[in-house]
Amino acid sequence: MQKAIILVALIPLLAACAPAKIPTAVPTETAPATLTSTLTPSPTASVTPSPTQTETPLPTITPTYAVLRGEVLEQANCRYGPGFPYLYKYGLVKGSNLEVIGRNDLGTWILVQAIGGNNPCWVKASLMDVKGDVMSVAPTYIPLPRSPYYGPPTGAYATWYRNVVTISWYGIDLKPGDDSEQFPYLVEAWVCTDGQIIFTPVGSYETVVTIADEAGCSEPSHARLYAVEKHGYSQPVEISWPAPPTPTP
């Protein structure tokens, strides 16, 4: 009876001393790693445009003109423009040596000045002994001195008929003492002659002039009209007229 009691008492002790039961580890499922595919964009092909082919312009040929020397053959009047209609500027002494720096279209009037000078004027070419070819000098036009006292003529009108252009205008009244004692009106005309436009100055005491103007030029004819007094020239009036018909071959 005593042994049974002892056994009963030992049972709890043995249970307490028994090694603890190690729980079986249950593997935890790990979700498979997601592979993130990062797509690197392919490089964009850069198309370099072909260079534009630029045409090289042809060089412009600038004519080379001469400056000549000349001797005055006789006492001569030197004028503000290339022709007798222009105002007198100063006189040239026989035997003077001058530079020839310009000419009109036909070479009949030349622009001269003292050697190394800067006060040019126009003289008839036949009154000078020019050393060289006058036509090798530059064709030239220089502005006329302006009058501060008179405006341009008014009412200017031009008509063309049978190779003649007629230009008319209203007159101006000059104050006493302002008369230049030369032409009170000047027409500078660019008219067609033998297929070329030729500069032609015309002076007039009347308020009308007639000038030959042929058909057949590629450029239109035209003119400028000035009033003239002893101090200079008025502002010009630009004048045009209908082009003449092209001649029938």
Image (tube, rainbow, N blue to C red):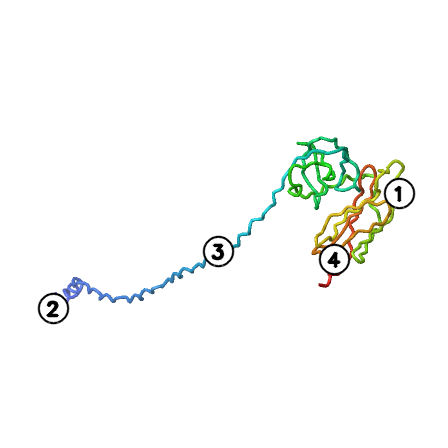
Q: Residue at x 70, y 46 (%)?
A: 106
In front of the other: label 3 or label 1? 1
Q: Secondary structure at mark 3?
A: loop
Q: Amino acid type of disc 3?
A: Pro
Q: Which mark is residue 43?
A: none
Query: Who is closer to the viewer here, 8 or 41?
Result: 41
Identify the residue position indicated by label 4 in the image. Answer: 215
Q: Secondary structure at mark 2?
A: helix
Q: Amino acid type of disc 2?
A: Ala
Q: Secondary structure at mark 4?
A: loop
Q: Which mark is residue 173?
A: 1
Is 105 on the left-hand or right-hand side of 209?
left
Q: Position of residue 125 (x, y in %)?
A: 72, 39
Mark 2 neighbour density, 10 Å: few (under 14) some (14–19) many (20 or more): few
Q: Position of residue 7 (x, y in %)?
A: 12, 67
Location of residue 33 by image quarter: bottom left
Identify the residue position indicated by label 3 in the image. Answer: 51
- Depicted 83 relative to depicted 168: above or below: above
In front of the other: label 3 or label 4? 4
Identify the residue position indicated by label 2 in the image. Answer: 4
Location of residue 104 by image quarter: top right
In front of the other: label 2 or label 4? 4
Q: Earlier in the sequence, mark 2 or mark 4?
A: 2
Cα gap from disc 2 to disc 4, whole angstroms: 161 Å
Q: Earlier in the sequence, mark 3 or mark 4?
A: 3
The C terminus sits in image quarter = bottom right
Is 123 on the left-hand or right-hand side of 172?
left
Cα gap from disc 1 to disc 2, whole angstroms: 170 Å
Q: Secondary structure at mark 1?
A: loop
